[in-house]
Image (tube, grey):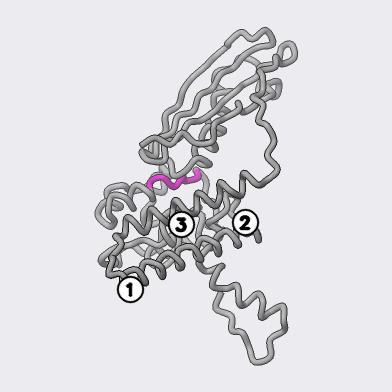
Amino acid sequence: MNANLGARPSYIWRSIWSARGLVEKGYGWRVGSGYSINIWNEPWLPSYGDGRVRTQGIDTRYTTVDDLIDQPVKRWKYEILQDLFDDDQASSICAIPLARTNLADELIWRFKGSGCYSVRSGYRVLRELAVIYWVVWFSRNKLVHEEYKSSINEVSSFITAFICEQDSICRTNGSARPIVAPRWEAPQEVVVKINFDSAFSCHSRFATSGIVAQDNEGFILAACVFPHSNVSDVSVAEALACLHVVHFAKESIVLPLHRIIGLKKCHRERLLQQN
C-alpha cells in the first residue's frame, strides 16, 4: 500500500497503482487473535464507516485489539469498550465473533461477504462513491444558487434511496428466474435430516436460529431455538446457525455423527429487518 509509482512505470503497474485509493477505502481486518491490529489506526470495525474507531482521545494503555479481548474465555472486555468508545461502537465491536483458537488476523475486502476483492464489488464501491460526490455537489449548488441548505439526514436518505433504486433496477433488468420454494424430502431409512434457518434484525442486532431434526417418516426427533445478541449482519447470523446445528447434531441425536447427513438449510427469506 505504501509503494511508489516510480519514474518509468509499466502500463500494468500504473493501472494497479492507480487503483490503490479504491483498495485503501475497501480493505480491512478480520479479527482473529487481535495481536496484529492497531486499535486506533487500522480499519477493523465491520459495517461501520471506513472501519476505523472514532474517539475523542487515545488511551495508550490499549494498543492492539487483543488488549480488548479476555483471552482465556475469548470474549470482549465490554467494560473497557464502554470506557473507550460510545455505545454504538462498543456494540459493533461486541458483535465481532471471536474464535476459540488463536487464528491469525487477516486482511480482507470489506465490501464482499467472502472477504475477497472482485472487479464487480470494486465497481459497486466506485458507483456508490460517485453517487455520494454527486449528491454532495448538488446540495452545495442548491445552497449557493437557491440558498437552500439540506440537512444531513436529507442528504443521507437521498443517497441511500438512490442506491437502493439503482440496485432494484439492476436486479429487474437481470435474468430473473421464478423462485420455487423447495419441498421437504424425506431422507433415506436410518438417516436423520436436519433443517435449520436463521432470522436477523439489523436494527436490534438480534438473531434467532431454528433447528429441526426428522427421520425418514417425517417424525420430529428433536427441535430447538437459539437466540443470539450483538450479531453484526445476516452472514454472521447464518454462520452461528451452522455452528449450532453441528453442536446440536452431536449432543441431541442418538445416531453416530457420521450417519447424520443432510445438514440442509431451509429456503430462507434473506433478511427480517425490523424497525
Image coordinates of residue 260 in percent, x first then y, are: 67, 21
- CA distance for labels 1 and 3: 50 Å
Dominant secondary structure, magenta: loop
Question: Given the image, on which type of amino acid does mark 1 rest?
Answer: His
| Label 3 – label 2 distance at C-alpha | 20 Å
Boundaries of the magenta span: 94-99
**Coordinates of residue 153 in the picture (x, y in percent):** 32, 55
- Circle 1 crowding by C-alpha within 10 Å: few under 14, some 14–19, many from 20: few
Please identify, in this view, whether the residue under mark 1 or under mark 3 is nearer the observer. Answer: 1
Question: In the current view of this chain or complex, which residue is farthest to the bottom?
Answer: 7
Name the N-terminal-most of marks 3 and 2. 3
Whether 14 is drawn above or below 245: the answer is below
Whether residue 109 appears in magenta in the rendering, the answer is no
Which of 22 and 253 lies nearest the eye of the viewer? Answer: 22
When asked about the image quadrant of residue 177, the answer is top right
Q: Residue 38 at what x, y percent from top left?
A: 42, 65
Residue that carries the numbered disc 3 in the rendered image: 34
* 111, above or below 274, in the image: below
Q: Residue at x 57, y 33 (%)?
A: 242
Is residue 37 left or right of 212 when viewed as pictured? left
- Quadrant in which the C terminus appears: top left
Mark 3 or mark 2, which is nearer to you? 2
Q: Which residue is mark 2?
A: 116
Q: State which quarter of the image contains the N terminus.
A: bottom right
**Which residue corresponds to the image point at 61% horizontal and 28% vertical from the top-left?**
265
Question: Which residue is denoted by mark 1 in the rendering?
Answer: 145
- Counting residues from the start of the chain, the first of labels 2 and 1 encountered is 2
Q: Quadrant of residue 159?
A: bottom left
Using the image, determine if residue 158 lies above or below residue 175: below
Instruction: Inspect the image, locate mark 2, and give the three-letter code of the amino acid beneath it.
Output: Cys
| Whether label 1 touches label 3, CB < 8 Å | no
Q: Is residue 91 left or right of residue 34?
A: left
